[in-house]
Image (cartoon, rainbow, N blue to C red):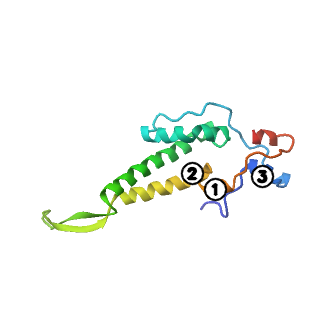
Amino acid sequence: MGKRGPAPKPTALRVLHGDRKDRINTAEPQPDDGDVVPPEWLGEAALKVWHALADDLISKGVLTSWDTEAYANWCDAVARRRDAAEHVAAEGAVVEHPVFNKNGDQTGARMGKNPWLLALDAADAQVQRYGARFGLTPSDRAQLKIGGTAEAGGAERLLS
């Protein structure tokens, strides 16, 4: 079973909010200022999504070299969502499905949900889940704060 309750606040936010010092993890590991490059497995459509936002997220300190896989997963989910949405737009939400008899001969057709809707729903869920980690939805972005006055010591490094 996972941890109960809401997800813990990031350390940088704890410092900005002025949380008690005993509740701030001053030994939290921090990624180096390494290059943030997209992974090789990222497809062409997902790569376009990557380049659309990556520079801005890097400059805000939200995307680091440790986050490339999670951000790449978000980009891939956005690309898959767009592809599924195009198919649904072209084919419609309800499509004809063939009906077969016990001998495998087609005997008619029935109307049913477009299978692309399943792909669209799955990609939507992934876009929301991964996007929240980077503050890419309005409600998640409202919870982030950038800037402010830092406490002395290790807290300055957390905010840089």
Mark 3 or mark 2: name the one nearer the start of the chain.
Answer: 3
> In whole angstroms, how far apart are the C-alphas of marks 1 and 2?
9 Å
At label 3, the amino acid type is: Arg
The disc placed on residue 140 is 1
The disc placed on residue 29 is none
Tell me whether circle 1 and circle 2 mark residues in contact (CB < 8 Å): yes
> In whole angstroms, how far apart are the C-alphas of marks 1 and 3?
16 Å
Q: Secondary structure at mark 1?
A: helix
Mark nearest the camera among 1 and 3 is 1
State which quadrant residue 101 falls in. Answer: bottom left
Q: Secondary structure at mark 3?
A: helix
Q: Secondary structure at mark 2?
A: helix
92 left or right of 50 in image: left
The disc placed on residue 14 is 3
> In whole angstroms, how far apart are the C-alphas of marks 3 and 2?
21 Å
Quarter of the image with the C terminus in it:
top right
Tell me whether circle 1 and circle 3 mark residues in contact (CB < 8 Å): no
Pointer 1: residues within 10 angstroms few (<14), some, or many (20+)?
some
118 left or right of 21 in image: left
At label 1, the amino acid type is: Asp
Q: Give the residue displayed 66% in from the left and 63% down from the top.
A: 4
Pointer 3: residues within 10 angstroms few (<14), some, or many (20+)?
some
Q: Give the residue displayed 44% in from the left and 57% down from the top.
A: 122
Residue 67 horizontal/vertical position (percent): 60, 41
Residue 124 horizontal/vertical position (percent): 48, 56
Front residue of this view, candidates 26 and 139: 139
Tell me whether circle 3 and circle 2 mark residues in contact (CB < 8 Å): no
Residue 97 horizontal/vertical position (percent): 24, 63
* Location of mark 2 (residue): 131
Mark 1 or mark 3: name the one nearer the start of the chain.
Answer: 3
Residue 92 horizontal/vertical position (percent): 32, 60
Mark nearest the camera among 3 and 2 is 2
